Image (cartoon, rainbow, N blue to C red):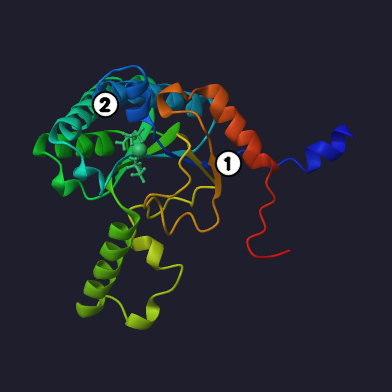
Amino acid sequence: MALFKKENEVPMPRHIAIIMDGNGRWAKKRGLPRTAGHAAGAETFRKIANYCRTLGVEYLTVYAFSTENWKRSEEEVSGIMKLLGNYLREALQDMEKNHVRFRFFGDLTRLSPELQQLCLDAQSRSGAFDDVQVNFCLNYGGRDELVKAAKAFALDVASGKRQAEELTEDVLPDYLYSAGVPDPELIIRPSGEMRTSNFLLWQSAYSEYVFMDVLWPDFGPKELDAAIEEYKRRNRRFGGV
Ligand code: IPE
Ligand code: IPE
Ligand code: MG
């Protein structure tokens, strides 16, 4: 029996993606401002990134701010940006200790010059680390990513670098923010919402989604373990039988 189990064991996902949702509701339940929920959510992110490192997860992609999140109040948006800045400054300081490699998916040009610089520094200074790669989705939208990819390919055709016929399912991903990163096997969305909200539209074609009722600030290693266990029980068919 033990042998049977081992042979059929689904390996750990190499790449886990998380839609970090539910901060606002967490704060509301406590009579706190939404920004307090984002601060608690940032703490959760620190813990989960660390836990993923100990689990040996190779890539952790987190949805931190979407192209649609600009619709929120200026107070909330600037609160989130401030937390991101704080996190990146801290990450830059602890770089040698944590060995996390950073990448940023999204259109960073809309962020403040200071935040853009922090992203660039975090990305370039962590390039050689390989404990876990954290892909931060900032001003990220799956549709925006696909439009930018189509535009970049069209420009390569116009300049003679590419032929239009060369565009295939293998070539298009090279034009995405996630170029070079394998698709996530597992996508987790806490907070009880069951939608993608414009997250990783191309990359999630065959990802296993796990939706959970817990709000992101209440998410912990126990919840991550449960999501991974659920993932391991899935039967991934990729269109086959
Ligand atoms: C996720 O939490 C964080 C961001 C979208 C930046 P929310 O702020 O969306 O929390 P809820 O969904 O309102 O509870
Ligand atoms: C998705 O959450 C974006 C992030 C978690 C960063 P939202 O709270 O923005 O999504 P909707 O509005 O519920 O679809
Ligand atoms: Mg939300």
Q: As drawn, is 4 to the left or to the right of 104?
A: right
Whether residue 11 is visible, yes or no, is no
Name above or below for residue 175 compared with residue 13: below
Position of 175 with respect to 209 (left or right) is: left
Q: Quadrant of the N terminus?
A: top right
Question: Which residue is labeled 2 in the image?
Answer: 34
Quadrant of the picture in which ligand 1 is shown? top left
Q: Quadrant of residue 160?
A: bottom left
Q: Earlier in the sequence, mark 1 or mark 2?
A: 1
In depth, the one of 176 and 241 nearer the eye is: 241
Taking the image as shown, residue 81 lies to the left or right of residue 163, namely left
Instruction: From this view, report whether residue 138 is shown above or below residue 131.
Output: below
| Ligand 1 closer than 8 Å to label 2 CB | yes
Q: Residue at x 48, y 37 (%)?
A: 192
- For this orientation, the residue located farthest to the left is 113
Q: CA distance from mark 1 to mark 2?
A: 32 Å
- Point out the image quarter for the C terminus: bottom right
**Quadrant location of residue 2?**
top right
Dot in front, 1 or 2? 2
Amino acid at pointer 1: Pro
- The amino acid beneath tag 2 is Arg
The residue under label 1 is: 13
Q: Residue 172: image x %, image y %?
A: 38, 67
Of 144 and 164, the residue lying toward us: 144
Give the crowd class for mark 1: few <14, some 14-19, many >=20 residues within 10 Å. some
Q: Secondary structure at mark 1?
A: loop
